[in-house]
Image (cartoon, rainbow, N blue to C red):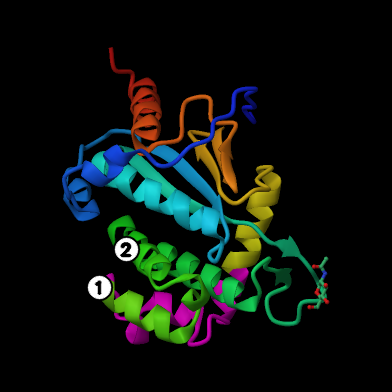
Amino acid sequence: MVYLSLLSSLGLISAAIALAPPLTVQDQFHTTFSDDVKVPVVLGVMSRCPDAILCESVFNRVLQRAGDKVDISLSFIARLNNSEPVYGVTCMHGQEECAGNVQELCAAKYHPTSEWWSFVQCQNFQGRDNIGTPETALKCAKTAGIDWGNSKAGQCAGEDGRGPEGIQLLQQSVKDSIAAGIQKSCTIIINGRQVCIRDGTWYDCEGGHTSADFIRQINAEYDRLNNAD
Ligand SMILES: *[C@@H]1O[C@H](CO)[C@@H](O)[C@H](O)[C@H]1NC(C)=O
């Protein structure tokens, strides 16, 4: 299941990304097909990790172009740790990162992709050190069209990112990541296959690491899943 490649590549995000027309994620989500099977895409991440933020910005472009073919989710990386009194897990970038993870998971549980994904993008735009704070969550919920104070997502996360339901979601997500063998933030998994890692640099990305490369791989999986000729 884990796809390892001897080829690795270094590089910057293609300049083409910056030149693409400004479609919004929302535009793509309005295009729906009735009975098609979406391609599962999982990003193994930590909310305050620079590599995760980069990965998510690449996937923002992917969703703008191919969002109607994708079922995206985040799988969080942390260490299970019974000695952690609040979260039961140790987040590599501190408890604020655990709070950010909880907020993103709760937004994703109760809101459609177009909304929770904008919530995550907004968090990322506030700067790493502001991810997970109550102020950022409120601001980004508003940006994403989520009424944090009165929503199930807000209740799930709690004011301080320590809501019991959110903590449960985080622990489950960490267990799922461990079970899936996800260790590096960011790990990109398309239809169950690990296709690329970004950890300081891009590696194990045989099919490439630009948004266009991921879209091409998603299109191929989509056609396979939907038996296109
Ligand atoms: C587990 O949590 C405790 C309490 O925060 C901490 O001191 C310890 O370093 C953690 N262990 C690991 C392996 O992260």
- Which quarter of the rendered picture does the C terminus lie within? top left
Crowding at dot 1, Cα within 10 Å, few <14 / some 14-19 / many 20+, comes out as: some
Query: Is residue 192 left or right of 41 when viewed as pictured?
Result: right
Ligand 1: give its quadrant. Answer: bottom right
Find the distance from the CA under tag 1 to the CA under tag 2.
Answer: 9 Å
Single out the mark in the foreground, 1 or 2: 2
Q: Residue 32 versus residue 76: which sits nearer the camera?
A: 76
Q: What element carries label 2?
A: helix
Magenta segment boundaries in residue numbering: 144-168
Q: What's the residue at 65%, 65% (across, down)? A: 171
Give the residue at mark 1.
145
Residue 88 x/y as whole percent = 73, 73
Q: Residue 144 versus residue 133: which sits nearer the camera?
A: 133
Residue 74 x/y as whole percent = 50, 54
Give the residue at mark 2.
118
Question: Looking at mark 1, is its residue's CB closer than 8 Å to ligand 1?
Answer: no
Residue 123 x/y as whole percent = 41, 70
